[in-house]
Image (tube, grey):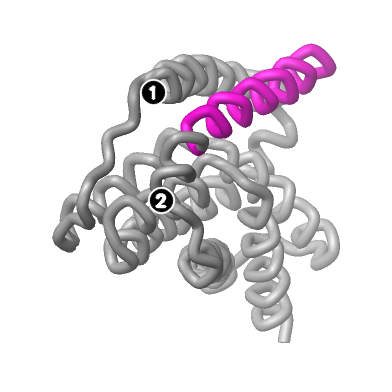
Amino acid sequence: METTKLFLLTYFAAAAGVIPPGLINMSVVKISLSENKKSGLVMAIGASIVVFFQALVAILMSKYISTHPSVRIILLRLGLVVLVILSVYFFVKSRLKYKQVKEKKFKSKKSFFKGVGISIINIFPIPFFVVISTLFDADAKADYDVWSVIFFSIAAAFGTFTTLYLYIFSFIRIGIDRKRFARRSNLFMAILMLILIAVTSIRIYYE
């Protein structure tokens, strides 16, 4: 019963965590619109697999991080550096002239590793799942066993993929103009990175 509760709560927490527009979901949508739906789905699978390992690391590190605030600060500072680099990258791309491209052929390996890459540089799921696992552990008042750790990580991956899947099909069904989306998405991503930089800086300051 506790394992089922852990799975469901983690699943919905992970799914909700990807709902706000962010680096992963916007990148998946962009690939889906600029290339094709299959590329977006495979990219979502690659990103979700990385989330599995991020959740695994988070739950194993949760107790250590809770007793070592300096580790949490290091993660936040690393994330800040990554966000600064990404904000510059997306801003530069938003200033480039957009070229209309035809729908590309489906390439599973390329799309998969794009998802893996974009998910790896997005380290924020780790502190997110650290908080989730700490809350669950406090309720259960017991250490996680091997199966609980595995189910926690699987639920995080499936929850992430569910929301990415809904993003892909929602944007495609709405029928968003690809040219307009491609022209504005990079600027949106740059602004999003700046917002995350501000939030991360505030968190580092108060830590």
Boundaries of the magenta span: 185-207
**Residue 144 location (% of width, % of height):** 63, 63
From the viewer's side, name the closer residue of 173 and 163.
173
Q: Is residue 183 left or right of residue 2?
A: left
**Residue 112 location (% of width, % of height):** 26, 55
* Residues packed near mark 2 inside 10 Å, few (<14), some (14 to 19) or many (20 plus): some
Q: Is residue 157 left or right of residue 108?
A: right
Please give the name of the residue rendered at 50% of the width and 47% of the height, measured from the top-left corner: 26
Q: In the image, what residue type sits under mark 1?
A: Lys
From the viewer's side, name the closer residue of 178 and 138.
178
From the viewer's side, name the closer residue of 123 and 195.
195
Please give the name of the residue rendered at 58% of the width and 70% of the height, measured from the top-left corner: 148
Helix, strand, or loop for circle 1? helix
Q: Is residue 110 above or below residue 184?
A: below
Q: In the image, what residue type sits under mark 2?
A: Arg
- The residue tagged 1 is 93
- Quadrant location of the N terminus? bottom right
**Residue 206 location (% of width, % of height):** 84, 17
Please give the name of the residue rendered at 43% of the width and 34% of the height, measured from the top-left corner: 121
Residue 178's disc number? 2
